[in-house]
């Protein structure tokens, strides 16, 4: 038997702990440090490189050169977000994205403005403007900026759980993925900037597999409200290089992919109102079941002979059912909408309902974009805007907070729990459990085309996996320990997704229910908030949307909702949703 | 397969892929086995494996880093302060921005060793006597102790340390550090007999009868050279070695008003800067050399020392030679200087050429000579053979004087640097080990290793500013003998280690199952040596252990 892992804990005291090193994390860190706080960033990989940051190639800014006003723009935001926007956050993006763009440029990010030879300086889509930045160009300058303002940076360390003392979050505990060195970071405030949550699809050519819902899982375990779990982000991808944006097959935002995202409902706010069905490549709005090749096979690319889907003629997914697929399905399987899942904010700065805990960027359900997608670059700039906000707020908050002093026994207990998969004499492989979880969640008829009984079946499987395996892993090294903890987090995330999906008994934006294929304003102009009950099960409640943000009642149903779900009109007529 | 292959021949070992991979797929091998040697390691007389402990510092594994350093280095805390760091001269990082602060990291980690390390004592082997406790002697003692020998160091002075203790001024190397280092050795089990001169207070024969099986003579080269010009025997002319010793032992706390120090090495600068701290009105530094790095006539002192000395008010007279010393009433009253047109030949042999015209003349109250040292044969036991010039006569490769008697350090080679003396002492320890085990001495165990490649042109390596030790302001530092700079902080050390390109290491694909084919590794790789297949990751359901039935069963 191998030696018991019981490394000595390195304890770091700081004002602000920031978990995650993408746009939100870097901006939060820089702003908090500039406001005088002592800031420690803990990053699972390397700041600015090993998450979704390198993927960013545009930066949304509101720009009146396209002849639309902020109010016009907000109107489009509501249309694409299907009235689930938190309009305070939408307006924050409109108001502050330009300033953050100036900063990210000042810090050294190469943009098309500074490198005009790239031949494009901005995307213009339906009245919005996204400034072009180079792939992979923003991360390193942000990292250097954070270091230059005195931020302490601990990298390749995974925070596994938040430390809670007397009802307040006072930091986190984690370990280094190569050496296993355990850290306890005691902080007066913690900001989770852990990004979106994927269910770790591999080999898809899109860098989202490292964002495994760690933040959402850690937050809900300490009592935070989580929201937005019923919505999906879906970038179709193949195994092509996401960095090679010259190819139409790329997972990045080329013309083909854009339309596919639209196909899931939602889309960039449009100057002209909701897009026509005809614009969408002739496809029925909503989900195209016939083309969901990869998803039907569990989202993991597999050998060609096993990868034929149900068939279809859609040119984007040509060959499905009859030949070699060109697309590998949706590379972001399990990811929620950008800015649309995670910690439910109590204020514009991302404060959670738990004392001492904040969220920012894709780890927070700001509902900046509502139930849809707000167009190129809104995720990068939205994360920066929200990160900066939380940084300022937290720097102010910590001024009046005492130095945390949780009991050493409690921290020691957390450490033992963290290392348990290393020290268990026997147990299950996290890779295997992950694969089974994916087999349950990835099929398009669970994740994207939802129906009550199928979700209940999936939930029953997920609960079995949680109860049987989540605390019974056996791993051989710290790389695998990371996988074990990610698997535990993803199982909880899967449950959240299913509970949220079952709670919203309607279709809206990227949430499509086969059994409720219509918008139900009477019951669901609300956000679904999730918490854990005493038994450790996910429970949901509805949080109504302020009336001032409701759609204009004088509009017809179809004026409000341009996208048509399969069978929508027939089914809504049956339940009396007319107009 | 996703990440298919790393072209090892092209891999420069920078670890960028390890850092950049979101899925933690790579690992870096920084060991020395079968791998290319980094330029810093190649240029280090001690052959440290800097990349290994730099990588460990980067990961904040200070205990492991300290062990890696200790295994090859007897006093990193000291060389971290006084070494001219030849390791930084060819640092590959210069091709990206600036050299790694290898010396600063060595100091940081050296201090960590002194403050935290658990010393392993294992003294059951043969007894070995080391004569002289300067760097060479201490290095010999340290390395013998690591190999299990029982070592006693004999020192003629009151305190161990040799020139560390008596010649290097406290503002470069404090008493506390020397004391800590000596205590560290004592904890390892090294015994010190001070105030004992072997050959005088105790004879070699007596030691042999006490059970000492081998001897390493490391008596150094601390006998100052004399100036040979008219007036050189005037009153008021002393030597830097004596002056620095008097200051360190508390026997000199003032200096005449106007002083000149003659010489262009570190000792000269030490003397001049010490004089400033003792309140000298003006101090002139007269040297044959120029300050022009890369030039054959460049001063031997380090660039940073020269800058610091200038800041402190030392008046430099470069490319000058003393033609004569003026004398009044038997005392020094001034000097006359001529030009030194050239100091060395192209092959660096010393061959000064002077002009005849007197270019400068000025009044002085005292002169300190720092024009070089030589060995002092009178310090040696009678059994040790010497050369005509008083150096210990050893076999060139084995350092054997004869039978169980070995030599080490400046006493053999003539004046060098601390690190060269350490390397010599280490070598002598190895030879004694072989001798006592009955092995063949003159056998080369060094494997010829290739030097790691340069970084490719047009690379996209991460740019990060060098972390330097923060210096104390000149106006403050001239007032006392405190260290002139602050050691790197823990935070700075981690940042600086992160800049290290760990040259010659090799990256390996350790966890290929987790590759998400995002290609960031290939994108960031400066050597373009990562191949990723075009095909999808064809996996089966059984490419992992479904259930691990305990380690015992599993293996």
Image (spheres, coloured by chain):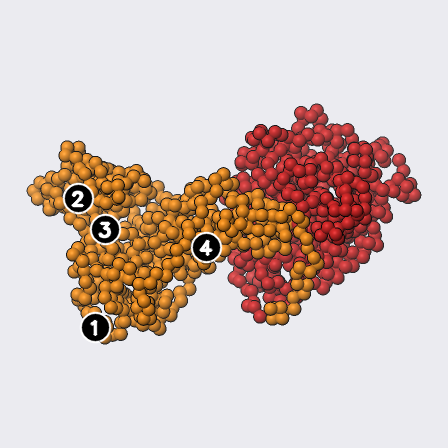
Chain colours: A red, B orange
Sooner in the amino-acid sequence: mark 2 or mark 3: 3
| Residue mark closest to the camera, 4 vs 1 | 4
Q: Which residue is mark 2?
A: B367
| Identity of the residue drawn at 50% across and 53% down | B506
Question: Is residue A3 something one can see in this rendering?
Answer: yes
Secondary element at image label 1: helix
Please state the chain letter of the residue tagged with numbered disc 1 in the rendered image.
Answer: B
Q: Nearer the viewer, mark 3 or mark 1?
A: 1
Image spot of residue A358 (x, y percent): 64, 47
Q: Which residue is mark 1?
A: B206
Q: Chain of mark 4?
A: B
Q: Are marks 2 and 4 in contact (CB under 8 Å)?
A: no
Whether labels 4 and 1 belong to a single chain: the reply is yes
Q: Position of residue B168 (x, y in %)?
A: 27, 51
What residue lies at 19% left-to-right and 35% top-to-bottom?
B339
Q: Give the number of callouts.
A: 4
Are callouts 1 and 2 both on one chain? yes
B58 to the left or right of A135: left
Crowd tier of the residue under label 2, counting other residues whose Cα lies within 10 Å: few below 14, some 14–19, many 20 or above: many
Image-quadrant location for residue A260? top right
Query: What is the CA distance from the residue labelled 3 to the residue labelled 4?
Result: 44 Å
Secondary structure beneath label 4: loop
- Find disc 3 in the rendering and name its residue: B244
User: How far is mark 1 from mark 2, CA to CA?
Assistant: 44 Å
CA–CA distance between discs 2 and 3? 13 Å
> In the rendered image of this protein, does residue A257 appear above or below residue A405?
above
Where residue A134 appears, as percent x and y from the top left, is: 59, 36
Which image quadrant for residue B466? top left
Query: Which residue is outermost to the left?
Result: B329
Q: Return the disc, 1 or 2, that comes first in the chain's sequence.
A: 1
Residue on which the image places disc 4 = B35
């Amino acid at each position: 038997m191998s030696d018991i892992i019981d490394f000595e804990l390195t304890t770091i005291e700081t004002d602000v702990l920031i978990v995650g090193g993408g746009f939100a994390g870097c901006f939060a860190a820089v702003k908090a440090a500039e406001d005088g706080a002592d800031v420690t960033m803990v990053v699972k990989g390397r700041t600015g490189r090993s998450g979704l940051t390198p993927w960013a190639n545009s930066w949304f800014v509101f720009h009146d050169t396209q002849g639309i006003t902020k109010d016009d723009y907000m109107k489009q935001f509501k249309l694409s977000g299907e009235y689930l926007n938190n309009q305070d956050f939408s307006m924050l993006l409109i108001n502050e994205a330009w300033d953050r763009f100036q900063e990210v440029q000042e810090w050294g990010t190469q943009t098309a403005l500074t490198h005009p030879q790239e031949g494009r300086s901005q995307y213009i889509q339906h009245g919005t403007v996204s400034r072009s930045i180079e792939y992979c160009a923003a991360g390193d300058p942000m990292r250097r900026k954070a270091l230059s303002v005195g931020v302490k940076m601990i990298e390749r360390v995974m925070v596994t759980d938040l430390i809670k003392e007397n009802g307040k979050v006072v930091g986190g505990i984690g370990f280094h993925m190569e050496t296993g060195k355990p850290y306890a970071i005691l902080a007066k405030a913690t900001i989770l900037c852990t990004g979106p949550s994927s269910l770790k699809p591999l080999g898809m050519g899109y860098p989202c597999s490292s964002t495994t819902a760690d933040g959402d899982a850690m937050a809900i375990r300490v009592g935070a409200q989580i929201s937005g779990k019923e919505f999906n982000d879906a970038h179709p991808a193949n195994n092509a290089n996401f960095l090679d944006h010259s190819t139409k097959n790329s997972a990045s935002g080329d013309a083909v992919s854009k339309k596919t995202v639209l196909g899931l409902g939602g889309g960039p706010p449009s100057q002209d109102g909701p897009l026509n069905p005809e614009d969408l490549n002739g496809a029925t709005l909503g989900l195209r079941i016939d083309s969901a090749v990869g998803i039907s096979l569990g989202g993991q690319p597999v050998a060609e002979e096993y990868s034929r889907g149900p068939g279809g003629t859609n040119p984007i997914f040509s060959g499905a059912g009859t030949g070699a697929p060109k697309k590998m399905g949706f590379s972001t399987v399990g990811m929620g909408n950008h800015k649309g899942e995670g910690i439910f904010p109590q204020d514009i700065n991302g404060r959670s309902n738990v004392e001492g805990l904040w969220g920012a960027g894709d780890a927070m359900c700001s509902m900046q974009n509502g139930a849809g997608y707000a167009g190129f670059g809104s995720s990068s700039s939205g994360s920066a805007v929200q990160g900066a906000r939380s940084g300022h707020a937290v720097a102010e908050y910590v001024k009046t907070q005492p130095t945390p002093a949780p009991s050493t026994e409690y921290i020691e207990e957390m450490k033992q729990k963290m290392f348990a998969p290393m020290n268990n004499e026997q147990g299950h492989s996290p890779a295997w459990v992950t694969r089974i979880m994916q087999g349950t969640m990835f099929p398009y008829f669970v994740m994207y085309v939802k129906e009550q009984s199928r979700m209940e079946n999936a939930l029953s499987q997920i609960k079995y996996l949680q109860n049987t395996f989540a605390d019974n892993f056996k791993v051989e090294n710290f790389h695998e320990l990371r996988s074990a903890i990610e698997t535990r987090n993803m199982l909880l995330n899967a449950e959240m997704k299913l509970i949220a999906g079952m709670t919203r008994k309607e279709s809206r934006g990227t949430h499509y229910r086969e059994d409720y294929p219509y918008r139900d304003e009477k019951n669901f102009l609300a956000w679904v908030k999730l918490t854990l009950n005493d038994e450790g099960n996910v429970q949901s409640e509805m949080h109504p949307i302020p009336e001032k943000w409701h759609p204009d009642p004088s509009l017809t149903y179809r004026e409000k909702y341009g996208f048509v779900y399969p069978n929508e009109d027939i089914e809504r007529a049956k339940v009396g949703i007319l107009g | 397969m996703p990440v298919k292959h790393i072209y090892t021949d092209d891999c420069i070992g920078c670890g960028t892929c390890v850092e950049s991979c979101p899925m933690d797929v790579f690992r870096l091998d920084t060991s020395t086995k079968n791998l290319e040697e980094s330029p810093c390691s190649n240029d280090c007389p001690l052959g440290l494996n800097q990349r290994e402990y730099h990588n460990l510092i980067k990961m904040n594994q200070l205990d492991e880093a300290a062990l890696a350093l200790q295994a090859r280095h007897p006093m990193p805390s000291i060389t971290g302060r006084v070494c001219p760091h030849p390791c930084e001269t060819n640092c590959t990082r210069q091709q990206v921005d600036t050299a790694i602060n290898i010396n600063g990291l060595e100091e940081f980690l050296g201090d960590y060793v002194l403050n935290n390390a658990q010393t392993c004592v294992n003294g059951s082997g043969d007894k070995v006597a080391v004569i002289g406790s300067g760097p060479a002697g201490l290095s010999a003692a340290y390395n013998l102790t690591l190999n299990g020998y029982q070592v006693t160091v004999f020192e003629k002075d009151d305190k161990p340390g040799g020139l560390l203790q008596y010649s290097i001024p406290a503002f470069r190397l404090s008493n506390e550090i020397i004391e800590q280092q000596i205590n560290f050795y004592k904890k390892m089990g090294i015994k010190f007999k001070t105030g004992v001169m072997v050959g005088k207070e105790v004879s070699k024969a007596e030691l042999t009868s006490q059970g000492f099986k081998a001897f390493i003579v490391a008596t150094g080269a601390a006998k100052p050279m004399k100036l040979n010009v008219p007036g050189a025997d005037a009153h008021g002319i002393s030597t830097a070695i004596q002056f620095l010793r008097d200051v360190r032992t508390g026997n000199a706390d003032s200096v005449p008003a106007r002083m000149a120090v003659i010489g262009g090495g570190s000792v000269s600068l030490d003397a001049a800067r010490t004089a400033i701290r003792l309140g000298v009105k003006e101090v002139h530094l007269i040297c044959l050399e120029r300050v022009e790095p890369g030039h054959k006539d460049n001063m031997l002192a380090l660039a940073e020392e020269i800058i610091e000395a200038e800041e402190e008010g030392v008046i430099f007279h470069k490319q000058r030679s003393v033609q004569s010393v003026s004398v009044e009433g038997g005392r020094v009253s001034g000097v006359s200087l001529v030009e030194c047109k050239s100091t060395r030949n192209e092959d660096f042999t010393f061959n000064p050429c002077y002009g005849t015209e007197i270019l400068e003349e000025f009044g002085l109250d005292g002169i300190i000579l720092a024009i070089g040292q030589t060995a002092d044969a009178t310090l040696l036991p009678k059994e040790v053979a010497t050369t005509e010039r008083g150096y210990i006569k050893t076999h060139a490769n084995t350092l054997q004087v004869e039978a169980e008697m070995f030599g080490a350090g400046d006493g053999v080679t003539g004046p060098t640097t601390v690190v060269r003396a350490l390397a010599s002492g280490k070598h002598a320890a190895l030879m004694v080990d072989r001798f006592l085990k009955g092995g063949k001495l003159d056998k080369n165990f060094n494997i010829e290793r290739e030097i790691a490649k340069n970084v490719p042109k047009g690379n996209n390596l991460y740019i990060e500013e060098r972390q330097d030790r923060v210096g104390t302001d000149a106006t403050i530092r001239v007032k006392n003998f405190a260290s002139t700079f602050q050691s790197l902080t823990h935070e700075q050390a981690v940042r600086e280690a992160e800049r290290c390109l760990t040259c010659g290491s090799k990256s390996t694909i350790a966890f290929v199952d987790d590759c998400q084919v995002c290609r960031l590794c290939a994108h960031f790789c400066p050597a373009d040596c990562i191949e990723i297949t075009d095909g999808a990751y064809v996996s089966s359901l059984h490419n992992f252990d479904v259930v691990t039935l305990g380690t015992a069963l599993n293996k």
